[in-house]
């Protein structure tokens, strides 16, 4: 299994080594470890050197972490792309839930990272919270390749993203009791889905409330198998192939 979206960062974990070793024991093949700022971009690049071919780094700046000097930071991200060859750009995107006062800057920051993803032919990991319309408009205009991380929207929105060639990242939310996501995912082909934990956030049922880990990917696979009435093996095989295609691994 591949966890296409994790945040194994010091800010969230004091047991990164243990978490990674547990993931290996629990049949995880690769972890895409996502930065959310310039400093965590350095951190995930460093960690990926320690766990070569296992922890794969995505670097970028999350909309919640915009600083006044973000343009300089993006220049530095570009230098890192050239020097360190990360596997993806992200996580980035739009978040109007946390802040809608700085929409224009968020859009500029997002677009600058879409440019990098296209220039260096890397997939982009997209966060979109209460910003579906702007996200879709930008993606229709720019057409990057990548993943809509932690997708939890409507069937109509899912279809729009898929039409653009994007994949839906499905995580712990699908295991939550009152989630409407199962109804949507029932209608979406496995060919358009990848699995993710977004750890340390969104710990799947029945571990909700505890620390999340890439090891819990199987709970998401299991729930999708249930919803689609197919085997868990089939879910794992197809979604892993999708991830391998996207990240060229
Ligand atoms: Zn995330």
Image (spheres, helix red, strand yellow):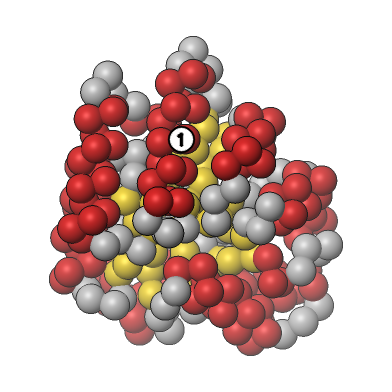
> In the drawing, does residue 135 fall left or right of residue 56?
right
Whole-percent x, y for residue 83 in the image: 18, 58
- Above or below, comparing residue 224 to residue 205 in the picture: below
In the rendering, at what x and y percent does residue 115 appear? 43, 43
In the rendered image, the residue lying farthest to the top is 101
Q: What element does badge 1 sit on?
A: helix
Position of residue 67 measured from the top left corner of the image (x, y, whole percent)? 28, 24
The vertical placement of 158 against 49, above or below, is above
Residue plotted at (20% across, 60% down): 84
Q: Nearer the viewer, residue 208 or 9?
A: 9
In the rendering, at what x and y percent does residue 90 appear?
40, 48
Judging depth in this view, the residue of 99 and 22 nearest the camera is 99
Whether residue 175 sits left or right of residue 127 in the image: it is right
Outermost residue on the front side: it is: 119
Tell me the residue at 32%/51% (across/down).
59
Residue 54 shows in the view: yes
In the picture, which quadrant includes the C terminus? bottom left
Q: Give the quadrant of residue 51.
A: bottom left
Q: Residue at (81%, 77%) from the top-left corner?
A: 229
In the depicted structure, whether residue 227 falls above or below residue 171: below
Residue pointed to by mark 1: 110
At label 1, counting other C-alpha atoms closer than 10 Å, the crowd grade (few under 14, some 14-19, many 20 or more) is: many
Whether the residue carrying mark 1 lies under 8 Å from ligand 1 is answered with no
């Amino acid at each position: 299994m591949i966890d296409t979206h994790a945040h194994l960062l010091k800010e969230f974990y004091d047991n990164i080594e243990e978490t990674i070793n547990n993931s290996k024991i629990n049949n995880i093949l690769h972890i895409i470890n996502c930065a959310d700022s310039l400093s965590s971009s350095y951190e995930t690049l460093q960690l990926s050197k320690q766990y070569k071919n296992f922890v794969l780094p995505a670097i970028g700046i999350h909309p919640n972490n915009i600083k006044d000097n973000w343009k300089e930071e993006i220049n530095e991200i570009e230098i890192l792309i050239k020097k360190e060859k990360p596997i993806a750009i992200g996580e980035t995107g739009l978040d109007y839930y946390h802040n809608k006062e700085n929409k224009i800057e968020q859009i500029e920051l997002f677009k600058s990272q879409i440019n990098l993803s296209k220039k260096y032919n890397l997939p982009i990991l997209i966060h979109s919270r209460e910003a579906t319309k702007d996200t879709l408009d930008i993606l229709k205009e720019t057409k990057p390749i990548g993943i809509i991380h932690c997708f939890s929207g409507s069937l109509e929105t899912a279809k729009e993203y898929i039409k653009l060639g994007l994949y839906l990242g499905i995580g712990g939310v699908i295991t939550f009791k009152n989630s409407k996501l199962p109804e949507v995912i029932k209608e979406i082909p496995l060919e358009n889905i990848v699995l993710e934990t977004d750890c340390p956030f969104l710990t799947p049922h029945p571990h909700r409330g505890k620390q999340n880990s890439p090891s819990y990917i199987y709970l998401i696979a299991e729930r999708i198998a249930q919803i689609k009435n197919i085997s868990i093996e089939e879910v794992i095989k197809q979604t892993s192939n999708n991830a391998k295609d996207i990240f060229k691994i």
